[in-house]
Image (spheres, rainbow, N blue to C red):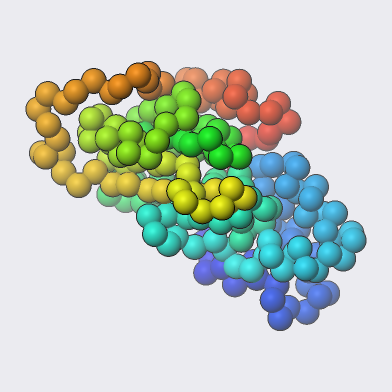
């Protein structure tokens, strides 16, 4: 997956004749057929207002991570953006010899799909990956990072943002040396360990059958 500064996918001030090229380029790596269909419908109907919202540059990291509306395209929270974020974090981890990640999710729309896709990408990239099998509060995910001495924590949530939003928070373990010697048991939960042998089945079990394998 090639890196860019976001301008590639920004149509504000762009010649409308280039709309098809910009949108179709994005759709090539979008793993969600529903998002692709929506964007193609925008093109067909010449809905430049919707396209301007979806293509206002890549969603950028702010406080603790990504937050944005649940819309298709690079400016919203969707499977294609989550795929890019997870792949970028994988590259960050490999560059720093980090080995493990734990993933949590809240009850917002899309959270389960975003968490499961992330788990598939991390496990498929060779990282030790745990995922909460059900919704959990953000502090529990932060606690799990220390409890498991995981290098990275991912929380799918938009915190206090409106219900139409979702987000992708990222935590790093400060120091394994500061981990309590005998940490308490994680309350009322059972983490699922994902590895290369079951990450595909996890995705097929918990996501729609129409979902395609993510492209890199």
Whole-percent x and y of residue 112?
A: 55, 33
Query: Which picture quadrant has residue 41?
Result: bottom right
Q: 3 or 134: nearer the eye? A: 134
Compared with residue 71, is residue 4 higher up or lower down, i.e. above or below?
Answer: below
Residue 13, horizontal then vertical, whole percent: 71, 81
Residue 46 lies left or right of residue 170; in this view the side is: right
Instruction: Pick whichever, 150 or 185, lies toward us.
Output: 185
Q: Residue at x 39, y 59 (%)?
A: 63
Q: Is residue 190 left or right of residue 202?
A: left
Number of disc labels: 0
Quadrant of the image occupied by residue 113: top right
Q: In this view of the protein, can residue 151 be seen by the observer?
A: yes
At x 35% / y 30%, what residue is drawn? 128
| Residue depicted at 27% across the width and 35% down the height | 143
Q: Using the rendered image of the protein, determine whether residue 21 is visible from the camera's viewpoint.
A: no
Foreground residue among 86 and 141: 141
Q: Is residue 90 left or right of residue 59?
A: left
Residue 72, above or below 193: below
Quadrant hosting residue 123 = top left
């Amino acid at each position: 997956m090639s890196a860019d500064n976001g301008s590639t996918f920004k149509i504000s001030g762009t010649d409308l004749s280039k709309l098809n090229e910009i949108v179709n380029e994005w759709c090539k790596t979008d793993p969600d057929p529903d998002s692709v269909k929506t964007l193609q419908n925008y093109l067909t109907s010449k809905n430049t207002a919707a396209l301007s919202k979806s293509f206002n540059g890549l969603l950028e990291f702010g406080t603790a991570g990504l937050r944005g509306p649940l819309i298709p395209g690079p400016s919203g929270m969707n499977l294609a953006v989550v795929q890019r974020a997870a792949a970028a974090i994988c590259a960050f981890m490999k560059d720093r010899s980090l080995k493990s990640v734990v993933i949590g999710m809240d009850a917002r729309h899309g959270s389960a799909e975003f968490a499961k896709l992330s788990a598939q990408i991390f496990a498929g990239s060779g990282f030790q990956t745990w995922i909460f099998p059900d919704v959990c509060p953000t502090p529990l995910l932060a606690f799990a990072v220390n409890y498991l001495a995981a290098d990275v924590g991912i929380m799918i949530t938009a915190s206090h943002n409106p219900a139409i939003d979702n987000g992708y928070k990222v935590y790093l373990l400060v120091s394994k040396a500061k981990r309590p010697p005998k940490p308490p048991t994680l309350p009322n939960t059972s983490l699922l360990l994902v590895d290369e042998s079951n990450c595909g089945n996890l995705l097929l079990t918990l996501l729609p059958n129409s979902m395609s394998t993510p492209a890199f």
